[in-house]
């Protein structure tokens, strides 16, 4: 199966999994996602590629219960399904906004351990594309 990242500047996806691509400032080590041309902390332009961690902690979240404006949103099917959206803190790196694989509000909590995963979505031209999402880490489930 061909994996098509919805935006190859945001992520690397291959048979080994998915990694998010951010930037690290060569002057102060600040990490940003998406990658930036200059540092938001110190303004330096010596930015390097940073492959971000795959584990994080749910920092805040909500459940999207109605379709966002389209475009840019592309519905996954005929009927809208609610989905989780959250901020996930990658320890020592950055807090990023992400889709969540869990949309049940009773199964999400601040501080919840999360792991990066792939999530298939419709692309803008009707093709299937892959984006990133974070999934709850279930203790003892071999994840
Ligand atoms: Zn900097």
Image (cartoon, rainbow, N blue to C red):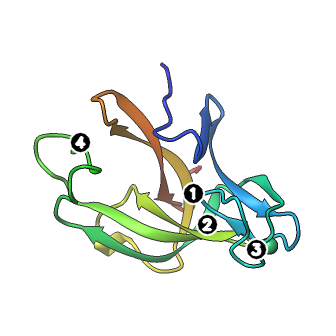
Q: Nearer the viewer, mark 3 or mark 4?
A: 3
Task: Give coordinates of residue 88: x percent, y percent.
Answer: 54, 69
Q: Earlier in the sequence, mark 1 or mark 3?
A: 3
Nearest to the eye among marks 2 and 3: give it.
Answer: 3
Q: Earlier in the sequence, mark 2 or mark 3?
A: 3
The x and y percentages for residue 5 are 50, 36
Determine which residue is flagged by label 4: 76
Among the two numbered marks 2 and 4 on one chain, the one whose residue lies closer to the N terminus? 2
Separation of residues labelled 2 and 4 (CA atoms): 26 Å
Question: Which image quadrant shows ligand 1?
Answer: bottom right
Callout 1–callout 2 Cβ contact below 8 Å: yes
Sequence-wise, the earlier of marks 3 and 4 is 3
Work out whether residue 72 or residue 56 is closer to the camera in this orientation and state it: 72
Which residue is at a point 66% across and 60% down the rendered structure image? 36
81 relative position to 41: left or right: left
Compared with residue 113, is residue 132 higher up or lower down, i.e. above or below? above
Alpha carbon separation for disc pair 2 and 3: 27 Å
Q: Which residue is mark 2?
A: 56
Give SS at disc 1: strand
- Residue 106: where, in percent of width, then height? 30, 74
Q: Pointer 1: what residue?
A: 115
């Amino acid at each position: 199966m061909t994996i098509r990242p919805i935006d190859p500047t945001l992520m690397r996806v291959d048979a080994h999994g998915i990694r998010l691509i951010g930037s690290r400032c060569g002057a102060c080590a600040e990490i940003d996602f998406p990658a930036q041309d200059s540092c938001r902390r110190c303004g330096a332009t010596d930015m390097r590629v940073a492959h971000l961690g795959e584990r994080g902690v749910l920092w805040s979240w909500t459940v999207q219960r109605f379709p966002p404006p389209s475009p840019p949103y592309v519905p996954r099917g005929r009927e809208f399904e609610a989905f989780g959206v959250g901020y996930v803190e990658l320890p020592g790196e950055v807090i990023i906004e992400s889709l969540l694989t869990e949309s049940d509000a009773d199964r999400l909590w601040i501080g919840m351990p999360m792991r990066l995963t792939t999530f298939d979505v419709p692309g803008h031209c009707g093709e299937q594309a892959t984006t990133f999402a974070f999934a709850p880490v279930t203790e003892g489930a071999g994840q």
